[in-house]
Image (cartoon, grey):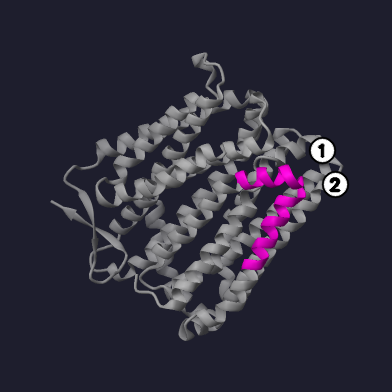
């Protein structure tokens, strides 16, 4: 990538701040249920605490996007990063709230505020990336998302270890202070890293509003075309399903692992059974999709692996297999590999068919459409992360952990059926390969006859 030194530094800072956001989002997974139950809360009452932040992001993100020209990008970023840090630090103080409903009310309130703050931060970062890295928006955006995903899957392990040594308060103070330090650093460095013309655009609401007005009509048309595409809908639904699986595991694995009499540290380390295979498999699946296989082929493979994994994670009641810690770890590994395959392929699938929708001769707008589908994909991922803990809490209270995993397995098989239907109905002569179009730097696809 032909980036300047300032651009590379800005990318590094953005990746670091996304890591801190991922930690504040996920660090409580192995020990929050323990604290909530000590306070007298049930899984159905505290389960939504994990996912409510994603619901707040899902709704607040578009609002920040709409009013960003009036608020100012840098101001929104400062609000987002500082708000996230403060919410993280204050959350640790809930250890001293003894009343059950007061504890739950403060937990939900702080997570909602944190979701709004993160939505503002994410929207402002994407706006800066779009202005500063023309032609490479998707690449830089993927780096930030990879950093966030890395922190999300590592957070539970770090949280379990810190909880063991410092009780409920230490993990939140660690993640909150880390977010504050990195956030303040990037706030002070940002004016020196943004190029002058782009900085002027970002800080000039009137100029930014003029640019938005010029593209408003075409944006509405593009959204309608994207959301009316069955393949794009399938990709977004697949993304939501994978996020639901991950959110469910992160929220309720701790409760299931209690039957093995593990310590909090051992429970936290057990989360690596899913996260390490996910981290290793994601770039491998990405390479396979880039070089050899179409996303339409990888997508059903991922759903098949996920369906198979839930035979072992639990395990499902109908096979009569006794719970076993080693089999559970193997199942978690399969969940990591399967979700990595599906999340990689759904993003590629959505990008691919979004770009195919571009009319001939209109390739100059491909970058806008690529950023648009990235936003839709992120929204679908946030919605899945809300559904997993929220609906999962109700189902676990009613059916138990081993009674809930078959529902996810059935959902995986339904998605597999849809994937196979797409493969069967797709014209075999319409195979698309990656190429670089002369008018647009992002990867596009051309038809091979």
Tell me where residue 348 appears, x and y as whole percent: 35, 51
Name the residue tied to disc 2. 97
Secondary structure of residue under mark 1 = loop
Secondary structure of residue under mark 2 = loop
Alpha-carbon neighbours of circle 2 within 10 Å: few (<14), some, or many (≥20)? Answer: few
Q: Residue at x 40, y 44 (%)?
A: 281
| Magenta run includes residue 169 | yes
Tell me where residue 182 appears, x and y as whole percent: 62, 67
Res. 356 image quadrant: bottom left
Q: Are marks 2 and 1 in contact (CB under 8 Å)?
A: yes
Res. 204 image quadrant: bottom right
Specify whether residue 136 is in view: yes
Q: Residue at x 52, y 13 (%)?
A: 320
Count up the numbered dots.
Answer: 2
Magenta span main SS: helix
Q: Residue at x 76, y 52 (%)?
A: 92
Magenta residues, as a range?
156-182
Tell me where residue 426 appears, x and y as whole percent: 24, 41
Specify whether residue 237 is in view: no
Q: Residue at x 56, y 81 (%)?
A: 191
In this view, the residue farthest toward the front is 165
Per the model, the C-alpha gap separating discs 2 and 1 is 9 Å
| Magenta run includes residue 335 | no
Tag 1 or tag 2, which sits nearer the N-term? 1
Which of the pair 281/166 is nearer the observer? 166
Query: Is residue 399 found left or right of 425 in the rendered image?
Result: right
Name the residue tied to disc 1. 39
Tell me where residue 54 appears, x and y as whole percent: 60, 51
């Amino acid at each position: 990538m032909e980036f300047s030194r300032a651009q590379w530094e800005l990318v590094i800072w953005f990746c670091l701040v996304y890591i801190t956001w991922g930690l504040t989002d996920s660090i409580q997974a192995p020990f929050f249920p323990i604290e909530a139950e000590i306070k007298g809360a049930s899984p159905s009452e505290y389960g939504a605490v994990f996912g409510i932040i994603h619901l707040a992001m899902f709704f607040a993100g578009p609002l920040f996007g709409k009013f960003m020209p009036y608020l100012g990008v840098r101001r929104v970023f400062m609000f987002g990063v500082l708000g996230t840090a403060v919410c993280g630090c204050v959350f640790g103080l809930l250890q001293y709230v003894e009343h059950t409903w007061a504890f739950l009310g403060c937990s939900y309130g702080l997570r909602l505020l944190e979701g709004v703050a993160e939505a503002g931060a994410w929207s402002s970062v994407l706006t800066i990336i779009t202005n500063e890295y023309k032609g490479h928006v998707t690449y830089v955006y993927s780096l930030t998302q990879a950093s966030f995903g890395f922190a999300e899957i590592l957070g539970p392990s770090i949280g379990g270890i810190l909880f063991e040594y410092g009780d409920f308060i230490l993990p939140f103070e660690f993640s909150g202070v880390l977010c504050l330090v990195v956030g303040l650093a990037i706030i002070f460095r940002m004016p020196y890293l943004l190029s002058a013309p782009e900085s002027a655009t970002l800080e000039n609401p009137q100029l930014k509003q003029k640019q938005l007005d010029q593209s408003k009509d075409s944006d509405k048309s593009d959204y309608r075309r994207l959301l009316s595409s069955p393949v794009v809908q399938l990709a977004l639904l697949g993304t939501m399903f994978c996020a639901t699986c991950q959110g469910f595991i992160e929220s309720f694995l701790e409760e299931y692992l209690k039957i093995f009499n593990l310590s909090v540290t051992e429970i936290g380390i057990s989360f690596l059974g899913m996260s390490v295979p996910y981290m290793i498999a994601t770039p491998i699946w990405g390479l396979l999709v880039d070089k050899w296989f179409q996303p339409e082929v990888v997508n059903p493979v991922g759903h098949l692996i996920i369906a198979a994994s839930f035979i072992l994670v639990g395990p499902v009641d109908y096979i009569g297999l006794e719970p076993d810690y080693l089999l559970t770890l193997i199942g978690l590994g399969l969940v990591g590999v399967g979700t990595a395959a599906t999340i990689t392929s759904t993003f590629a699938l959505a990008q691919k068919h979004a770009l195919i929708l571009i009319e001939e001769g209109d390739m100059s707008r491909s970058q806008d459409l690529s950023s648009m589908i990235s936003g839709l994909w992120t929204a679908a991922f946030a919605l899945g992360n809300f559904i997993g803990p929220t609906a999962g809490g109700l189902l676990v209270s009613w059916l138990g952990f081993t009674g809930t995993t078959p529902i996810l397995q059935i959902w995986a098989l339904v998605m597999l059926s849809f994937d196979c239907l797409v493969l069967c109905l797709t014209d075999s002569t319409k195979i698309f390969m990656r190429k670089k179009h002369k008018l647009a730097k992002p990867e596009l696809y051309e038809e091979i006859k």
